[in-house]
Amino acid sequence: MADATALGMPSVRTPRAPQRIGQSYHIRTFGCQMNEHDSERIGGLLTADGMVATPTLEEADVVVLNTCTIRENADNKLYGFLGALRAVKNRRPGMKILVGGCSAQKDGDLVMERARWVDAVFGTHNVHRVVDLLDHVDEWGPVTEIWEETTSTDDFPSYLPAQRETPHSAWVTIAIGCDNSCTFCIVPTVRGREISRRVGDVIGEVRSLAADGVTEITLLGQNVNSYGRDLELNGRRPVFADLLRQVGAVEGIRRVRYTSPHPKDFKEDVALAMAKTKSVCEQLHLPLQSGSDRILAAMHRGYNASRFLSRLEMARDIVPNLAVSTDIIVGFPGETEDDFAATMDVVAAARFDQAFTFQYSPRPGTPAATMGGQIPKEIVQDRFDRLVTLQNQISLEKNEAAVGGVEEVLVEGPSKKDPTVMTARTRGNKPVHAPGRYEPGTYLRAEITQAAPHHLLGRVIS
Ligand code: 5AD
Ligand code: SF4
């Protein structure tokens, strides 16, 4: 590992002398990339304390669940999982169970009330405290620690040692939290207000990762376009477009992605930075949420359908071969058949490469949860199925257009279904399966031979 300080990074906190040498841990992560990133840091802290990762949960001395609460089924998954863990803990009473992440932040003491076999509950602002909490458990017994916010940028998980899963790809957080108030969303409650990292810290981390052999970087933030608003000094603030150029210019970095921009703030400067910076991939995740102006207003999204479509057109004009994905919620309170038809129209017009579609789920404490006009499950399901059918057709047509072309792909590893086939990713972030065994992290050129809605088939040509 390169010396982070020499590369301009703030020094990673110096861990104490390892005290849990030889003990094992297993981390199970639910939810988004921000949680994956936090889990890498939790793994890094436990490793620094002498522990080793084990793929077998049943054998682990410490099990950490890093939880998600974005929709109700994420919470249900947690409690289902904790139920199953009870039997394991009965067999191995010495096992420690820790629950962190967004459900923990939201539910706090309730987690332990519902699952008394849990040893520690910690919030999204307490990731750096995981080893101290284990010490507390050993000495005093069960503990819950949930802070309201991250008060110091030094407590960003980004400054903790990391145990990364993939040697060639890494996530880099540029901001935590969210200052928006989309009425369906629990993220601002569980992740707090938005705090940006300083440009020098972000670039320092990217340089250090590049020195470690990383070639692909994904920048993370709940709303990357508002990056730097809180860093304004004497009327000047760093902007995301500049950060993107600077990250893209770091030697050794061949691919840069980012997630997510907010359509209300996505401007030409970012599209231009994408087009002008070779390493920034032709990929954009622009969450639509709904195609109805009435519903978009009720969601507090700050744009209407026509503005969304014109921003998308602008991005496609500036960035050739742009692959676009989106998020859509079906069945927001008050959604009529006409509102849903408007969503279908925008989806047909936008021709996304991919859409992540969700059924609206009321989240406690969010304004939408108590709005009138909650939609019955059968109606939501019916609309959801129609939307998925339309999008699958569009995704297939988009992927078919790639057949016969040649794409640069980055090898991820053997395919899960067939080890004689490898899975790689195009710059547009589409999975390609091709015969052969190749080292993960290798860049190859593949001819695309066949298309399906959610993947491509190909053959390596060089
Ligand atoms: N119900 C359904 N989907 C939701 N999302 C966020 N909150 C909810 C909710 N309450 C979706 C949005 C967001 C994605 C990460 O999850 O589409 O962009
Ligand atoms: Fe949630 Fe809206 Fe913030 Fe995204 S921008 S995290 S949807 S509140």
Image (cartoon, helix red, strand yellow):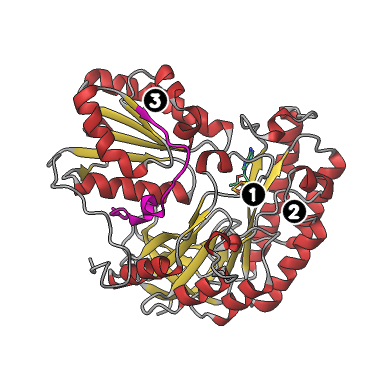
Q: Is residue 176 above or below residue 401?
A: above
Marking on residue 302: 2
Residue 162 in magenta stretch: yes
Q: Is residue 59 left or right of residue 412?
A: left
Can you see residue 430? Answer: no
Residue 23 appears at what percent x and percent y? 16, 38
Residue 144 appears at what percent x and percent y? 37, 27
Q: Is residue 162 above or below residue 338?
A: below
Residue of label 3: 82
Residue at image coords 45%, 25%: 79
Of 210 and 90, nearer the camera is 210
First in sequence: mark 3 vs mark 1: 3
Numbered disc 2: secondary structure? loop
First in sequence: mark 2 vs mark 1: 1
| Labelled pair 2, 1 in contact (Cβ < 8 Å) | yes
Question: Where, by quadrant of the figure, is residue 359 drawn?
Answer: top right
Residue of label 1: 180
Inspect the image, locate mark 1, and give the three-letter code of the amino acid beneath it.
Answer: Asn
Which residues lie in the magenta part? 144-165
Nearer mark to the viewer, of 2 and 3:
2
Q: Is mark 1 within 8 Å of ligand 2?
A: yes
Q: Is residue 112 left or right of residue 347?
A: left
Residue 9 appears at what percent x and percent y? 33, 67
Question: Where, by quadrant of the figure, is residue 409 drawn?
Answer: bottom left
Point out the image quarter for the N terminus: bottom left
Point out the image quarter for the C terminus: bottom left
Inspect the image, locate mark 3, and give the three-letter code of the amino acid beneath it.
Answer: Leu
Of 230 and 14, nearer the camera is 230
Mark 2, other Cα within 10 Å: few <14 / some 14–19 / many ≥20: some
Residue 93 in magenta stretch: no
Question: Where, by quadrant of the figure, is residue 131 drawn?
Answer: top left
